[in-house]
Image (cartoon, rainbow, N blue to C red):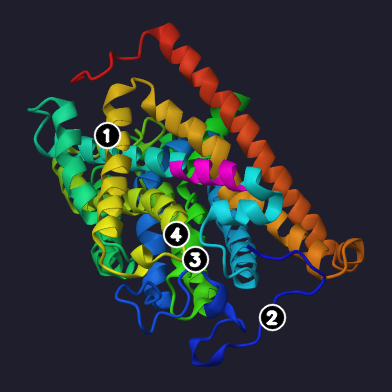
Amino acid sequence: MSEKGSSSPSFKADGENAAPLGYHDTDVFGREEDHQIRYKTLSWQLVAVLMIAEIVSNGMLSLPSSLAVVGLVPGLVLIIFLGMFALFTSWLLIQFKLRHPEVHNMGDAGYILAGPIGREILSFGTIVFAVFATGSQLLAGQIALGVLSSNKLCLMLYTGIFAIPTLLLALPRTLDRLSWLSVVSVLGIIVASIVGMIGAGSHPVDGWQDRYQVTVKTDFVAAFISITNPVFAYAGHFMFFILISEMRQPNDAMKAAYALQISATTFYALFAAIVYIYLGPDVASPAFTSLPLKWSKAAYAIAIPNFLMAGSLYSHTAAKLLFIRFFRKSRHLHQHTLVGWGVWVFLIALMNAAAFVLAIGVPIFNYLVGIAASLFASWYTYGIAGAFWLYDSWMYQGRSEAWRKKWAMCALSWLTLAAGAFICVAGMYVTVKQIVDAYASGKVSEPFSCG
């Protein structure tokens, strides 16, 4: 891990690979010229595709219902602001990764910040959030298959059917094998969203011109639930270190982040506004469910590749964190060994099985996803990025003097930490309240039920 000292890691280019000086000698995969399995093969364009495939997914389908709670203008302002904020935290994460090439995942970053305890907490959070996110994609697939077949089968069976290709797509050891499939995923969610917007516009609710509201007066719990939807729609930063670790030219990572955040923010705002305006305050979450049946079926069918790839990327991330933990600097990491492949397949199967069991066996699973997102995604996407800048400026740029000279960045970093803490605490509060209300109203189903 990084040695704590007074000099900042170098940002000079390391030859043709466009990385900080010494990067390829200290990063987790090292120099791969003689390796059978080469990880560092991704261009920034393919990393951007992977980022979009992972982030722009079923979370987008909850955004119109958020606008229904707070109103058109506050909702759009929130979506755009959070997108810009996520771009800022992306820059902080990428700068930290370039200064610390040995960081492969959030656990490694936690070790630098807080030693072994930090590593275990952030590693655990990454795995938990990735597994829950995989389960969420399985449920999105369940809904899609249910709509397409008019719910002729037990919903649990749909989840099982969807879980099989999700597992298989996660099996490649390197992300470049998933990147080209992610192109189909990105095209799928874009076309599906366009179909959804056309469906909403061609079949609006009666009196739609008078039904949407510019602003809506609401209480804190309802308002913050609507805030968490766009917050968690941007929740993909926990994968950034892993993605950058497999880039040929890590100095280009910010280009991928720009492509992600600009496209995601633009598309989120357009989709949320158009669907809310035409379908009104009763728009469902996921929004495709509120479309006429033939439009709903078309949108869900086209979105299925995205749900599959997003789930596969999440389970791949959870498995890879543990795989690197087990085999860092081992021949099993870079060679086709029986042990390496056996452990890899086992980890992929384990993560997908855990996601499947949680999704179908825990009646309050959707609420638990909210709790996991509040506990971890609030920090990975927003809060902890501030700690990265504060740490590096303190350790390598003059301690308190660096904070004083760069007071604006220092203030922004502390505000970023505070924002992460607020989203975490408030998100936990409203999610727990939702669980209590759900049990009180009898909305919670039985485990492993078909309903």
Marker disc for residue 264: 4
Give x and y (percent) for residue 378. 58, 43
Could you tell whether 57 is left or right of 181 in the image? right
Identify the element where label 3 is drawn: helix
Camera-near label (3 vs 2) is 2
Image quadrant holding the N terminus, namely: bottom right
- Mark 3 crowdedness (10 Å alpha carbons): few <14, some 14-19, many ≥20: some
Name which quarter of the figure residue 320 lies in.
bottom left
The residue at which mark 3 appears reads as: 262
Which residue matches tag 2?
A: 10
Within the magenta stretch, is there residue 186?
A: no
- Callout 1: few (<14), some (14-19), or many (20+) C-alpha neighbours within 10 Å? many
Mark 1 and mark 4: span between their CA atoms?
A: 28 Å
Residue 125 inside the magenta-drawn segment? yes
Q: Nearer the viewer, mark 3 or mark 1?
A: 1
Q: Which of marks 1 and 4 is nearer the N terminus?
A: 4
Amino acid at circle 1: Phe
Residue 299 in view (yes/no)? no
Q: Helix, strand or loop at disc 2?
A: loop
User: Who is closer to the viewer here, 436 or 192?
Assistant: 436
> Which residue in the structure is indicated by mark 1?
356
Q: Is residue 275 left or right of residue 5?
A: left
Identify the amino acid type marked 3. Ile
